[in-house]
Image: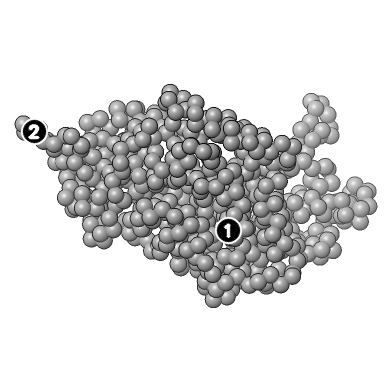
Amino acid sequence: MRSDTPAAAPQLLPDLVEALRGDLSRARYTVERTEQLLGEVAVAALHREDPLPARRALAGASDPAAILFSLFTLGAELPAARVAEVLPTLGTGGAQQLGILAPAAGRAAASGAPSLLHATIDLSPYSAQDDHGHIDWWIASDRSELATRAALRPDHVLGVGGASLTLARITPRARVRRVLDLGCGSGIQALHATRHATHVIATDLSERALAFTAFNAALNRAQVEVRQGSLLDPVAGETFDLIVSNPPFVITPRTPGDDADRFTYRDGGRAGDSLLAELLEALPAHLAPGGTAVMLGNWERSGSQEWDQHPRRWLARAQAEGLDCWVIQRESEDPAQYAGTWARDGGITPRDPQWPCLIDGWLDDFESRNVRDIGFGYVLMRRPLPAAPTDAAAAEGSGPTPGAPAPAPAGGPAGTMRIEQATGTGSGSLGGHLAAGLRMMQRLRALDDAQLARTRPRRAADLIERRHLVPGAWDPSLIELVQGAGLARTIPADQVLAATVGALDGTLTLGQTIGAVCALTGDDPDQVEERLMPQLRELLLTGMLEL
């Protein structure tokens, strides 16, 4: 099933874009207002991709935001006069010049019937909160299945979905000079980056995607440079302080006769998970000192492999070159689950005739590599600063001339490789939490145990202790240190570790604290310090302790 041929991407006509912005503002076309108009039931149904309750809730509504949402998100065909009322500055003529509205096909006015218009794009309100405050934007993209009632086309440009929101949440928001949004789609990551970067470059293989990114930047009064090309080709020889990417990582069968281009918008045309391998091989050369890369990805596990075998192999070279690498697996799916998830994502359901062939192709492809399951998660890299650890925080964001090539490896120490499975999410800024963990990798690498014992760590404000006791018992059968922020980790502890962490308030050194605890327990301080140091380093890396 294919949708109708899409209209051209919206035109970048500055005066008309500014008129559209004014009309959207006056209509109070925001997430908050549309959710008020829709009600809880309809909003929840939309999250399940069921538009019917929303259409019922807005039927006959006269509120400008309701009309705009019906037109641009739900796919309604509306009388031109009614549309003109909610776009008084732009007008229906200006909207058609921009390429965001068109006459409804086959519904030309006859016998005095009003002419109808339909949207050629999705134009939805977007709301978020980042480290720099509240955001209210509008994001243009290709129309979704809610509006077209058809499968997505290969050149489809996605709006803001779950993956986009996840990537925005895990991206550090420290002020930097240069940011690259690789595989920008409709440009949501680039827009976020403009709030804390001097220069933002957005790249994509799709000319259509770049047109949407440029349109969205203009509509939201942001400055973004767009460049066309595959992966890192458009920025050859350049470096960045932050690279953010939701690459086309979806694993799609590559078999003879298969309609392999059906998912071009989310699939990079490589077999298996090799696209991510290719990208991670090339990425380190584009990170400036202190620069961070943050991306989403999938990886396969075959046969008796450990789940992390592929990402470990992909990042081995970067680690050897001194970069700190962090992989976090958030979930995994078996091949049948994965095939069903991404078939539905493309608008194909079990009721469609091509479902059996499509799923068979996916399962055959996974079987050819003996794939047991497919993981999803985050991949982060950071090129450490050359400054001493005590100067690292002050030097963050400083470095060589913007855009200059990264320094060649000088045979220095290898970076840190951290691989974990973490399914929880706590409170606070996840992007800030992950950035702090990457910086801590460099700092801890420069401290041996004797030096660490002379530091004055503090337990994090969100850290609590949880004790499990058999009813009536005095001593706990299990003690857990529980993180309220970050990834909401839970780490088992014994009495000595719990007592040490509980006493860390920054007053005494770590060594003095361990000595004081041992004075109460009668344990040997040297032996306890040797035993606790790996655990305390882990607590520092996870943000449960702070330096």
**Label drawn at residue 217:** none
* Rendered residue at 71%/36% (across/down): 303
Q: How crowded is mark 2: few (under 14 residues within 10 Å), some or many (20 or more)?
A: few
User: Considering only order in the chain, which callout, 2 or 1, is on the residue closer to the N terminus?
Assistant: 2
Location of residue 137 in the rendering, given as x and y in whole percent from the top left corner: 36, 51
Q: In which quarter of the image is the C terminus?
A: bottom right
Is label 1 in contact with label 2 (beta carbons under 8 Å)? no
* Rendered residue at 42%/62% (across/down): 227
Location of residue 477 in the rendering, given as x and y in whole percent from the top left corner: 82, 33
* Rendered residue at 60%/45% (across/down): 273
Q: In this view, does 292 lie to the left or right of 387?
A: left
Disc 1 to disc 2, how far (Cα)?
57 Å
* Rendered residue at 68%/38% (across/down): 302
Q: Is mark 1 on a helix, strand or loop?
A: strand
Residue bearing the label numbered 2: 110
Q: In which quarter of the image is residue 383?
A: bottom right
Residue bearing the label numbered 1: 293
